[in-house]
Image: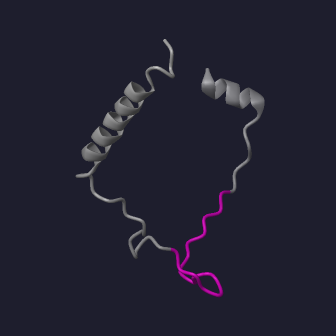
Amino acid sequence: MNIAKNMETIFLAALVVVSATSFATASAPAPRLAAPAAVQARVDAGMDANMTVVTVSAKRLSAAEKAQLEG
């Protein structure tokens, strides 16, 4: 297939695909760019006094214990 001879057909096919795509996505709702106010992080000089801190104090599993859990 000689691309130079069929360039007009290739262009028209690409134009049809792009047009169909733009019409198919035209009715889709616009994406929300901002997160809701409840999710947005607050920028304070310090940390929030009500922030929950979780401390996990447990020993790590050895290779033999990991193998036993997997098998």
Displayed quadrant of residue 6: top left
Front residue of this view, candidates 2 and 55:
2
Q: Is residue 1 left or right of residue 20?
A: right
Q: Residue 32 appears in which quarter of the rendering?
A: bottom left
| Residue 51 picture location, percent across and down | 56, 76
Task: Name the image quarter holding the C terminus.
Answer: top right
Q: Is residue 49 above or below residue 10?
A: below
Foreground of the two, 56 or 32: 32
- Mostly what secondary structure, the magenta segment? loop
Please tell me whether residue 55 belongs to the stretch shown in magenta.
yes
Q: Give me the residue at 50% from left, 20% from top.
A: 3
In the picture, measured across the screen, residue 52 lies left or right of residue 17, that is right
Q: Residue at x 40, y 29 (%)?
A: 8
Q: Which residues are the magenta region?
A: 41-56
Residue 37 % position (x, y): 40, 76
Is residue 34 positioned above or below 2 on the image? below
